[in-house]
Image (spheres, rainbow, N blue to C red):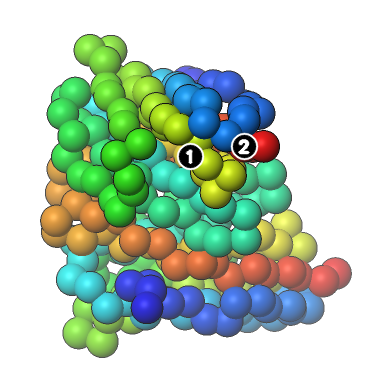
Amino acid sequence: KNEVEQSPQNLTAQEGEFITINCSYSVGISALHWLQQHPGGGIVSLFMLSSGKKKHGRLIATINIQEKHSSLHITASHPRDSAVYICAVRSPGNQFYFGTGTSLTVIP
Amino acid sequence: DAGVTQSPTHLIKTRGQHVTLRCSPISGHKSVSWYQQVLGQGPQFIFQYYEKEERGRGNFPDRFSARQFPNYSSELNVNALLLGDSALYLCASSLAGLQGTETQYFGPGTRLLVL
C-alpha cells in the first residue's frame, strides 16, 4: 500500500483542455509538493502546499488537509505541459513519500 | 546562479562493486536530500542531511550511506551493488529543510546501471 496515490496514471488531452490530477495521501504531513518531471529525468518543483490554494500562471494547486487530498489543475493546456506530474508529501518525522506520477500528454 | 549539480551523469557498474555519487547544492542551501527513482516508478526517499547530520532516512538497506561535507556538498555511497540498484539517483537541496516546508530544488540526476 502506497502512502501517496495519484490518479489518473496516464492522461491524454487536447490542447486547450482543462486538466485535473488528483493526489490522496494516508500519512500526516508537514507539506505537500507537486513536481514536474520531463523526459530525461529533470525534476522541477511546481508547488509546495501546507494549506489552501496556490496559483502560478496556468497552474493551480489545492489541498484539503481534512480529506488528505490535493489536486493540480492546468488551465488552457499546451503541448509543452506534457510531462510526468508527481505528488510528494513530507511527514513531520521527515520522511518523504512520492506518488508514482501521472503521465500527461497534450496533443496539439 | 548554478543550480544543483550532480556527478557523474551516467555510470555503469557490475554487481558487487561500490559506487559514490556526488551532489553540490545551490549556494546557500544547507540541506541535501537523496532519492532513488527506478524506471517507471516515482522517486523513493533515501536520506536527508542538514548541517552535516542525517535528519531523515528512508527504507533502504545499510548498503546505502551518505555524508555531507562542511561546504554542504554530499556523497551517496552504495556498496555491494545489486542489479536492482539500477536507477536514477536524484539529489535535491533546500535552504534548511528541517520543517519539511521548504521548496526543494532537484539536480539532473545520476543514471546508474548495474550489470
Say which residue label 1 marks: B90
Above/below status of B69 relative to A101: above
**Residue A14 placement (x, y as % from top left):** 78, 78
Q: Chain of mark 1?
A: B
Above/below status of A89 relative to B28: below
How far apart are the alpha carbons under marks 2 and 1?
17 Å
Above/below status of A96 relative to A11: above
Say which residue label 2 marks: B114
Q: Does A7 sit left or right of A92 as displayed?
A: right
Q: Residue furthest right?
A: A108
Q: Does B80 sit left or right of B69 as displayed?
A: right
Q: Earlier in the sequence, mark 2 or mark 1?
A: 1
| Number of the front mark, 2 or 1 | 2
Q: Amino acid at mark 1?
A: Leu
**Residue B92 placement (x, y as % from top left):** 40, 37
**Can residue A100 be seen?**
yes
**Can residue B29 be seen?**
no
- Quadrant holding the C terminus of chain A: bottom right
Q: Does B80 sit left or right of B52 as displayed?
A: right
